[in-house]
Amino acid sequence: MLTTLLINSIIIFIGAYLLEGVKIKNFWTAIGVAILLALINTFIKPVILFLTLPLTIITLGLFILVINAWILMIIDKLVEGFSVKGFWWAVLFSIYISIANAILLKII
C-alpha cells in the first residue's frame, strides 16, 4: 500500500510537469493529492459509480471519465498547491494517471 501511494505520488508529480493545465507546488503536495485521491476512490467513488450506473451503461463506460475528472476538480479545491485549469485538463490528467498506474503497477 505504501509502495502504491509512493508510485501514485510520483505519477501525479510528473504529470503536473507534463501537462501545462495541471500545477503542483512540490512533492509533498503530490503525496497529499495521492492520499486524498486514494481515500475518495476507496470510500466515495463506489457510491458515485452505483448512483450513476444507468448513465455509465448508456455511455458505454465513458461517464467514468467524467467522474474521475470531477474527483480531480474536487481535490483541486481541497488541496492547496494543486490546481487543474479546467474540466478537459482534469479528464486528460485522469487518463494519464490511469495509464501510468496500469503500466507501473504491472511492472512492480
Image (cartoon, grey):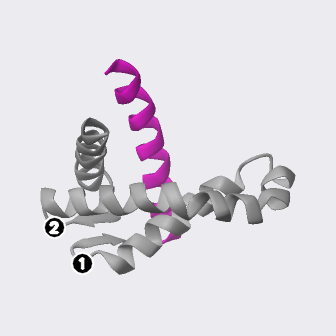
Per the image, the residue denoted by label 1 is 80
Decide which of 15, 6 is in the foreground and name it.
Answer: 6
Per the image, the residue denoted by label 2 is 25
Going by the numbered disc 2, the residue's amino acid type is Lys
Labels 1, 2: front one = 1
Percent x, y of residue 60: 80, 46
Question: Is residue 63 inside the magenta stretch?
Answer: no
Task: Look at 22% across and 56% down and name the residue there.
Answer: 31
For the residue labelled by badge 1, is the local secondary structure a helix, a strand or a loop? loop
Q: Is residue 98 above or below residue 92?
A: above
Going by the numbered disc 1, the residue's amino acid type is Glu
| Mark 1 burial class by Cα count in 10 Å: few <14, some 14-19, many 20+ | few
Residue 54's tag is none
Q: Is 86 positioned to the left or the right of 56 in the image?
A: left
For the residue labelled by badge 2, is the local secondary structure a helix, a strand or a loop? loop
| Mark 2 burial class by Cα count in 10 Å: few <14, some 14-19, many 20+ | few
For the magenta stretch, what is the residue range? 86-108
Question: Is residue 93 inside the magenta stretch?
Answer: yes
Q: Is residue 91 above or below residue 79?
A: above
Q: Earlier in the sequence, mark 1 or mark 2?
A: 2
Percent x, y of residue 41: 50, 56
Decide which of 38, 71 is in the foreground and name it.
Answer: 38
Q: Is 7 positioned to the left or the right of 51 in the image?
A: left
**Residues at circles 1 and 2 in contact by the CB criterion of under 8 Å:** yes
Task: Look at 70% across and 57% down and name the residue there.
Answer: 63
Assign the magenta stretch its main secondary structure: helix
